[in-house]
Amino acid sequence: MSQYYAVIEAGGTKFNCAMFDAQHNILSQNRIPTTTPAETLDACIEFFLAQKQAGLMFSQLGLACFGPLDLNQNSNNYGYITKTPKPGWSDTPILARLKNALECDVAIDTDVNAAALAESRWGAAKNTQVSVYVTLGTGVGVGVVINGNTLKGLIHPEAGHMLIPAPEGIEGQCPFHGNCVEGLASGKALSKIWGRPAETLEDDHRAWDIQAQVVAKLCHNLLVSYSPQSIVLGGGVMAKPGLLDNVIRYTETSLQGYLDFPDGVSLSSLITLPGLGEMSGLKGALGLIL
């Protein structure tokens, strides 16, 4: 009997639903806009029920979801999206809704934790004991993997809200913290700071040099906090040509030679783009059930 796996990469703008086979091939896929919880989840459920009707039977679903999430299995609200800035989604029992409607087990983690897991198993952070995945998109998320397990702890990492000094003349846009990394370096923040969408900013615009400085401060803090063997920088914002090189350069300046890396290790080998490209999220959801 063939083994099939259902996965969802649940983001703030779209829910990417897919079916994988045992060889990790995508058999079917559907991208559903993130609107209201009822409308979005109903569409996801309809997609997966159709897969069952087509013969792709599954007993497990991996859910890599935007947060914050309640990941405490002893909590009455386990599997809930908790207090989120996404309008209408706070206190959504997303795990229970999918589990009951699809009659399957659901494994849940944050989208960035899942992406970090995928990169540590199959991507740029393969063969590491400690790795970090950062997504710089609409928001800024940070996932951490230690010895093959995602870090959850009290809640789960929220290092995208790490406070850092704002560059001169720049005001952070996070409604909670102002000058946190997300408030300075997310795509949404860039659009607010510079008055137009980040993707329309010219390659030589001052915004990108500031962006590199901000992300470098994040990398500095991640290096001294977690001692990761890999920091993977993903998300749409990192697609800007030259940004990665400038982040590495500013991180080196920030560290001032303090960290003594092992032979053969440099910041350019440690701070990289995703090895899985745009598949980190979906593969991460799969990793939650494998």
Image (spheres, rainbow, N blue to C red):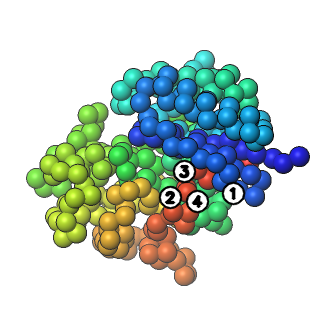
Q: CA distance from mark 4 to mark 1?
A: 17 Å
* CB under 8 Å between discs 3 and 2: yes
Is residue 285 visible in this depiction of the protein?
no
Crowding at label 1, few (<14), some or many (≥20) Cα neighbours within 10 Å? few
Label whose residue precedes the other's in the sequence (2 or 1): 1
Judged by depth in the image, the label closer to the viewer, 4 or 1, is: 1
Crowding at label 4, few (<14), some or many (≥20) Cα neighbours within 10 Å? many
Q: CA distance from mark 1 to mark 3?
A: 15 Å
Label whose residue precedes the other's in the sequence (4 or 3): 4
Circle 4 SS class: helix
Judged by depth in the image, the label closer to the viewer, 1 or 3, is: 1
Q: Give the residue displayed 61% in from the left and 30% down from the top.
A: 46
Q: CA distance from mark 4 to mark 3?
A: 9 Å
Quadrant housing residue 139: top left
Label whose residue precedes the other's in the sequence (2 or 4): 4
The residue identified by callout 3 is: 281
The residue identified by callout 1 is: 25
Q: CA distance from mark 2 to mark 4?
A: 11 Å
Residue 282 x %, y %: 58, 50
Judged by depth in the image, the label closer to the viewer, 2 or 4, is: 2
The residue lying toward the viewer, choosing from 206 and 98, is: 98
Q: CA distance from mark 3 to mark 2?
A: 7 Å
Residue 79 x %, y %: 59, 27
Judged by depth in the image, the label closer to the viewer, 2 or 1, is: 1
The residue identified by callout 2 is: 278
Tell me the amino acid under the disc marked 2. Answer: Glu
The residue identified by callout 4 is: 119
